[in-house]
Structures are given as structure tokens and as C-alpha cells.
Amino acid sequence: MSAARATVKSPSAEFAIRPMQRSELPSRTITLARFLIGKVIVHDLPAGRLSGRIVETEAYPPGDPAGHHFRGPTPRIRSMYLAQGHVYVFFNYGAHFMLNVVSEPPGTAAAILIRALEPLDGIELMQHHRGATRLLDLTRGPGRLAAAFRIDRRHDGLDLCAPGPLWLGAIAASAGAIAKTVRIGITRAAERPLRFYERGNPFVSGPKRLLLPAPPRKKASSELK
């Protein structure tokens, strides 16, 4: 997808957004993280509708040392044990809320971080929420998108597959080529390629590590002596 897409004000006017059912979601975290690329987050507010295409995700599967669930259940992560399609929201470093989609059957904790959206509906409202006018500054990155969409801890535990103001949708337009690479901003299990993104989309948040690192070069026998 070209950078010119970033200048379009309301692509969703051309595509009907239909609510997604839980039965449509793949049953495992990593598969779901890839599946969500190209799907749509919708937040219906009194001031108007906000929507955006998901263009970047990070998977945190069961048993992942980098996940909040690694050390077991706590009150803060109770929503991670709900059925897939529910919302898990956490406050990162005391500065930004982060939107996650619960990704396993009830009782098994795992989630997918929504890292970036491509704005569709409600761009002027997003600009007001963010105090920014540049389109690329609105939803490129998990903290920015949560602020633009007015998502906070009040939304923790909501069901994205049930009627309500915050929901998961799909449009007829298919996603572009999907690539994967390592996750951003973690130290544990940092080498695992569990970040998925739409290749070439200008709203992807992590340009520095978009390509998987090449495997280490094997030393020739003469170099080992």
C-alpha cells in the first residue's frame, strides 16, 4: 500500500463495515494475530464514529515470557482469561493505554497487541483527541491509537464480538502482503518473530526492524583455527 493512501480522508465511505462473529476468529493466538491484519476496530462515540484498519499486531501466546500472563493470574489481567475477542487494556509505563485482543479459549491467558491502525472514519475527531493534525501521527503506534480512539481501562473486558460501542469489523477490501518480524520494546523472548504488519503501509509503527534478521554467517574452517 502506497504512502498516498495516508491522504485519503474517509476510505470507509467506500466499504461497508460488518461486525465480526467470534466463530470467524482463528482459534490460536499467532494465527489470529496475522488474521487481524486488514480487519477494522470501530468505536462509536456520541460525537461520531471512529474506525481504522489494523495494519500491525504483536502476538503474546500462552506461556510467553514477554506476556503479562507469564507469572500467572492477577486482578490486573483478569480479562486475559476471557474468551477470545474480548478486550484487554493496560496502562504502559504510566503514560499510555494499550489495546489488546484476547486470543485463546476461556481460562487460557493470551492476547494480541494492536500496534497500529490506518484511520478510516472520524479523522477530525481523532485529531482533536490527539491534539495533532498530521495523519501519520494519529494511530501509528499503540499509545497513539488508544488516545485517538479514546480507549482506556473502562473498556477492559468488553466483548468486541458483541453489540456495543467498541467492536471488531471487516470490510470487503483485502489486506496487502503481510510480513512478520520480531516484537518491539521487549527484552524477554525478543527474538521471536511474532509481529505482523501490512507490508508498505505508512501507518506501521516500527520501521527500524521491519525485516527479519539474517541468520548468522557460519565461519569457515580457516577462521576457526
Image (cartoon, rainbow, N blue to C red):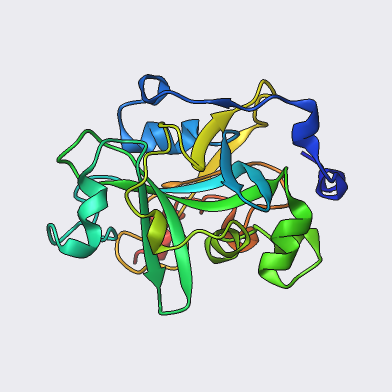
Extreme-bottom residue of the structure: 94
Q: Quadrant of residue 85?
A: top left
Give the mark count: 0
Quadrant in which the N terminus is drawn: top right
Does residue 201 lie above or below 76 as drawn? above
Q: Residue at x 81, y 66 (%)?
A: 133
Does residue 106 lie above or below 64 as drawn? above
Question: Where residue 102 appears, x then y in whole percent?
Answer: 33, 43
Question: Where residue 220 appears, x then y in whole percent?
Answer: 43, 55
User: In the displayed structure, does residue 35 sit left or right of residue 170?
Assistant: left
Residue closer to the observer: 132 or 103: 132
Q: Residue at x 27, y 46 (%)?
A: 110
Question: Where residue 181 appears, x then y in whole percent?
Answer: 50, 49
Residue 60 visible from this viewpoint: no
Residue 7 visible from this viewpoint: yes
Quadrant in which the C terminus is drawn: bottom left
Extreme-front residue of the structure: 46
Question: Where residue 62 appears, x then y in whole percent?
Answer: 22, 45
Q: Residue at x 13, y 62 (%)?
A: 71
Residue closer to the observer: 138 or 124: 124
User: In the displayed structure, does residue 125 sit left or right of residue 82?
Assistant: right
Q: Residue at x 41, y 54 (%)?
A: 155
